[in-house]
Amino acid sequence: MKPEWNDIYDEDRQPTGRVHLRGTPWKPGEYGLVVCVWVYDGRGRLLLTRRSPGKSFAGTWENSGGAAKAGETSREAISRELFEETGIRADPAEFELLCTDRDRNTIYDFYCLYRPVSLKDTVLLPGETDGIMWASYGKIHWMIRTRRICRIIAGQFLRQEARLKLRNMPKHYR
């Protein structure tokens, strides 16, 4: 497998001009960029993919996302990640930024994208994803309670649910 390099940012999200080898420890004050997207259909459903065996949190469901590679913008990274994991193409400008967050060594950009695709038109990446579904908010809550959704993604969903519903629910359901 080819080594993956990520840009290193400071706490103010400024690029340092240095790169980090994925899988090696981060130093204090160094941050990598991770992007995630909630694809929605405008009818109250979100697109979820299942993590392949051999990955961390294998067999759990999540939204698409991953680490930005060195030289990529946040929007370029989310466009690439969505295509790699689902085969869905979207121009970087189509993604709507929901919010940004940060933890010990990661800056997170959370996006949403309106794309009512048919599941038969999606293409899963072997070794990354092995299942795909449209899920209602109620089903997602059930999946969280039964631990079918990756715990990190479950927390993201609960923090972002209200913002997603504003975009994704038909007006008579809001």
Image (cartoon, grey):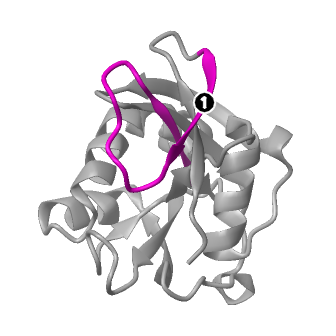
Residue 85 vs residue 18, the one in the foreground: 18
Residue 46 located left or right of residue 158: right
Q: Percent from the top left, x then y, of residue 93? A: 84, 38
- Residue 112's image quarter? top right
Q: Is residue 24 magenta?
A: yes
Q: Percent from the top left, x then y, of residue 44? A: 52, 55
Q: Which residue is mark 1?
A: 18
Residue 134 vs residue 100, the one in the foreground: 100
Residue 28 located left or right of residue 69: left
Q: Is residue 144 magenta?
A: no
Report the quarter where the N terminus lies: bottom right
- Residue 92's image quarter? top right
Q: Percent from the top left, x then y, of residue 122? A: 69, 82
In what element is the residue under mark 1?
strand
| Point 33% across, 29% down: residue | 27
Q: Which residues are magenta?
A: 14-38
